[in-house]
Amino acid sequence: MKTPPLIVFTDLDGTLLDHATYDWSPAAPVLQDLIQNDIPVILTSSKTAPEIADLRSAMGLDAYPAICENGAGVMPAGQGAMPERDAYWRLREALDSLPTALRAPYRGFGDMDVEHVASSTGLPLEDAAKAATRAFSEPGLWSGDDQGRADFIAAMAERGVHARDGGRFLTLGWGRRKSDAMAEVLAQYGNPPSIALGDAPNDIEMIEAATQGVIIPNPHRDPLPPLKGEGDGHILREQMPAPNGWANAVSTLMRRYI
């Protein structure tokens, strides 16, 4: 594989996509410019592979892999290409190996029908079905007490499974983050320079790991705290929110590499 002059890693909601409308049309000309200059754009999201697939195709990015489930895994390049689900089934086996008293209060997406996933997430049924098609991680709801929750997390850790509290859901996974998946993709392309853009706490490690990090402001959430690298210009704060801020930052920074 030829090493490109640059790779762009980008979060979706609130970074490339408008937080409220999911519009990305102002960024379309910049995406085309990147493609024409052989610069891979790696969509990097908490969404599942089926959730990302249609958007990746609409943006003309099927030639590139994407990072799904908050970095838990990488979906291969190619229209409609989906990752293997072995890691998810191993996670479910670890979950089901717990004693009943620990297992019963946790209800993961794999324990729910699509209607329950929809009611738990607020998604329409079609979107809920895509969100429930996991390949690497398992969100779920805890109905027990705090001590039981702590014991559950400890028991899963003994099985190599990490638990992260996302507010509404307690998500189980194998400990990978967006920055880990980013390193995997960079290695596939020969470790070229990188730009990483994000707006949320789960983007921080990816932003800090990139050659150039960009924080996109999101008026719908608290701003990210000061990050290491901002003082020396390694990380920039864009002034405009998505998608215009994304377009402005990328169109400016890519000129340094082409």
Image: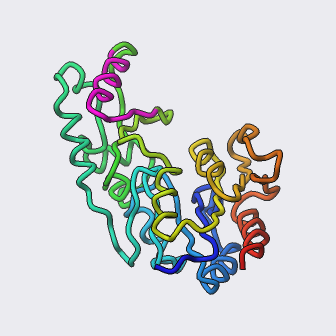
At x 51%, y 57%, the residue is 182
* 127 in relation to 153, above or below: below
Q: Give the range drawn in magenta.
A: 148-164
At x 19%, y 27%, the residue is 98
* 25 in relation to 130, above or below: below
From the viewer's side, name the closer residue of 65 and 46: 65
Q: Main secondary structure of the magenta part?
A: helix
Q: Quadrant of residue 239?
A: bottom right
> What is the total number of numbered labels drawn onto the structure image?
0
Of all residues, the one furthest to the top in this rendering is 147
- Colour setup of the view: rainbow
At x 28%, y 24%, the residue is 155
Q: In this view, does 237 lie to the left or right of 177?
A: right
From the viewer's side, name the closer residue of 74 and 50: 74
Q: In this view, does 89 lie to the left or right of 230?
A: left
Where residue 64 appears, as percent x and y from the top left, is 47, 74
